[in-house]
């Protein structure tokens, strides 16, 4: 038997109009990693917020190290040894690593002044424990997201945390950073910490977790060891039904060329050319930082191009700003939806229709509110967006449901070219399939889609053709018949320098 560090028993929590948790349970054991999984809106984040005292529970018990507890807020749960690493990092960019780690707890000398030497020495020690080579005097703003996440972990460790909660920790990490995070997790297990690991990436669960707890609609569905499960049985627990074929590919004769990108160069992009056809899904693969997002930003007008041309339906266009892109029917859905895409204080309806209001105006220029509402209702239904009403403030929806709204917002603009940058990051398996079906539906109607994704099975499952980008250049182009995961990977690390010829 493993020591039970923490037990959450029969937790209930309601918000106005939403029962977020109705009888949720979770056990965290020393030296083991507990995956906490469930569809978007299942209640995972709410359960963690109840644990750390951000929300007070309506009912249930929390037992920590054998005692019944009720934390008043994150500060008290942190001091008790429960550390949480949120998806949104909470570090102050203008301060150094050490200042962030010991913020408000700096070491002082006998005169009551901050003992900077000790503060930096202790921070360096923590970084070394995590095998991090950078100096704790470095500013947070100089670190990559992955490095910042490591600093968050160092901070959690500095509290001698016994329970560490990681909420979608690998979302913004490169493969190398993910590998070092897993190393750290293994080390924490050896030190008898208990870890809660929240993720939609099932592969990672099989790689790093020992046990799994599944929530569905706020209810506890079950706890199993990873060894008892395979991917299919796990999905069945999550969505309550068997999920057939994850990638519902449709074959469709592609139409003429809609977009030609010719010798495009600029920051992060080096002489890239490709064509995109009507009714085609062009996958763009590559590792994080390869220049894919920079290329997309240049096409729709957010980043300037130094040279090259963009030809839309036979005409050269200039996209000097995102509104130029929009006016030409090029819609880009950002990978960073929270920062770029949505206005968190506004309602689901207003977010979704914000850029598409022209579609709901009658011949006298008056907004037809009924049409707007119907269209929003249709998308909420199509995407199965979990919200008590379309007037709900979007910041109160679960992360995955916010992403569905962002994609619906793009489609509502009736684009001729839709660029989706990592569209299913943070989205659960059931919702992913709904998004794929919708993309296909629009492809059927002739929409040209660029699908930027680091998820190889997704790119292979959805695209008709795949470009691979490495260090700002195209290192591979594959028709879906010839593409394999190995070939994509080789091109993504710059190995396959010759292009595979496919009909353009
Ligand atoms: N402060 C709040 N006010 C109103 N409703 C809320 C609030 N916080 C969460 N909810 C609702 O509670 C439900 C559970 O949300 P929660 O964020 O816990 O889901 P999740 O499992 O973490 O989802 P995801 O995987 O998408 O992040 C959702 O329907 C959400 O809209």
Image (cartoon, grey):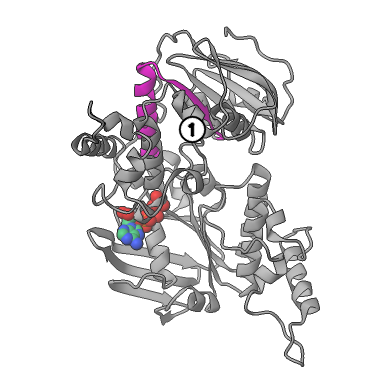
Q: Is residue 418 visible?
A: yes
Is residue 414 in the magenta section?
A: no
Q: Residue furthest front?
A: 364
Residue 276: x %, y % from top left: 52, 16
Instruction: Answer few, some or many: residues within 10 Å of disc 1's Cα (few below 14, many 20 plus, some between 14 and 19).
Output: some
209 left or right of 117? left
Q: Above or below — where is 115 with respect to 304?
A: below
In the image, taking residue 190 as reference, residue 362 lies left or right, namely left
Which residue is at 36% across, 46% downward? Answer: 401
Looking at the figure, which quarter contains the C terminus?
A: top right
Q: Is residue 191 visible?
A: no
Q: Position of residue 251 (x, y in %)?
A: 40, 14
As drawn, which residue projects farthest toward the left? 370
What element does badge 1 sit on? Answer: helix
- At x 70%, y 33%, the residue is 267
Q: Position of residue 42 (x, y in %)?
A: 34, 53
Q: Which residues are magenta?
A: 429-454
Say which residue appears at 71% left-offset and 82% top-offset. Answer: 107
Q: Is residue 433 rendered magenta in the image?
A: yes
Residue toward you, 455 or 323:
323
Which image quarter has ligand 1? bottom left
Q: Nearer the viewer, residue 239 or 256?
A: 256
Residue of label 1: 323
Q: Is residue 134 left or right of residue 36?
A: right
Q: Nearer the viewer, residue 196 or 382?
A: 382
Q: Main secondary structure of the magenta part?
A: helix
Q: Quadrant of residue 14?
A: bottom left
Q: Is mark 1 within 8 Å of ligand 1?
A: no
Q: Residue at x 32, y 54 (%)?
A: 393
Residue 432, above or below 386 = above
């Amino acid at each position: 038997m493993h020591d039970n560090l923490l037990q959450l028993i029969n937790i209930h929590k309601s918000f106005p109009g939403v029962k977020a948790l109705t009888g949720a349970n979770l056990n965290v054991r020393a030296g083991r990693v507990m995956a906490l999984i469930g569809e978007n809106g299942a209640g995972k984040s709410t359960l963690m917020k109840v644990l750390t005292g951000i929300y007070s529970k309506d009912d249930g018990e929390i037992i920590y190290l054998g005692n019944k507890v009720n934390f008043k807020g994150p500060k008290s749960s942190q001091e008790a040894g429960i550390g949480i690493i949120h998806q949104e990092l909470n570090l102050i960019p203008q301060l150094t690593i050490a200042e962030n780690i010991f913020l408000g707890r700096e070491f002082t000398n006998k005169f009551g002044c901050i003992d900077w030497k000790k503060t930096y020495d202790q921070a360096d020690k923590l970084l070394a424990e995590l095998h991090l080579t950078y100096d704790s005097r470095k500013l947070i703003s100089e670190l990559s997201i992955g490095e910042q996440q490591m600093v968050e972990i160092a901070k959690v460790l500095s509290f001698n945390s016994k329970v560490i909660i990681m909420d979608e920790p690998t979302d913004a990490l490169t493969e190398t950073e993910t590998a070092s995070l897993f190393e750290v997790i293994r080390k924490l297990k050896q030190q008898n910490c208990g870890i809660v690991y929240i993720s939609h990436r099932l592969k990672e669960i099989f790689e790093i977790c020992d046990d799994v707890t599944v929530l569905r609609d706020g209810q506890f569905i079950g706890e199993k060891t990873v060894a008892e499960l395979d991917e299919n049985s796990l999905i069945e627990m999550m969505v309550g039904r068997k999920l057939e074929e994850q990638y519902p590919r449709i074959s469709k004769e592609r139409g003429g060329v809609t977009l030609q990108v010719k010798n495009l160069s600029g920051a992060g992009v080096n002489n890239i050319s490709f064509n995109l056809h009507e009714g085609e899904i062009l996958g763009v693969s590559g590792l994080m930082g390869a220049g894919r997002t920079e290329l997309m930003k240049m096409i729709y007008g957010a980043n300037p191009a130094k040279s090259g041309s963009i030809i839309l339906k036979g005409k050269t266009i200039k996209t000097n700003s995102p509104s130029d892109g929009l006016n030409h029917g090029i819609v880009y859905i950002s990978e960073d939806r929270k920062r770029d895409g949505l206005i968190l204080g506004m309602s689901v309806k207003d977010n979704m229709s914000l850029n598409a209001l022209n579609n709901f105006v009658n011949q006298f220029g008056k907004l037809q509110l009924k049409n707007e509402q119907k269209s929003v209702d249709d998308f909420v239904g199509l995407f199965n967006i979990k919200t008590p009403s379309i007037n709900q403030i979007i910041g109160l929806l679960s992360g995955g449901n916010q992403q569905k709204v962002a994609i619906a917002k793009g489609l509502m603009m009736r684009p001729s070219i839709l660029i989706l940058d990592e569209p299913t990051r943070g989205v659960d398996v059931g919702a992913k399939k709904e998004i794929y079906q919708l993309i296909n539906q629009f492809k059927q109607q002739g929409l040209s889609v660029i699908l930027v994704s680091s998820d190889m099975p997704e790119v292979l499952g959805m695209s008709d053709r795949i470009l691979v980008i490495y260090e700002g250049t195209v290192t591979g182009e594959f028709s879906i018949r010839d593409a394999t995961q190995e070939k994509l990977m080789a091109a993504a690390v710059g190995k396959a320098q010759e292009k595979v010829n496919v009909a353009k």
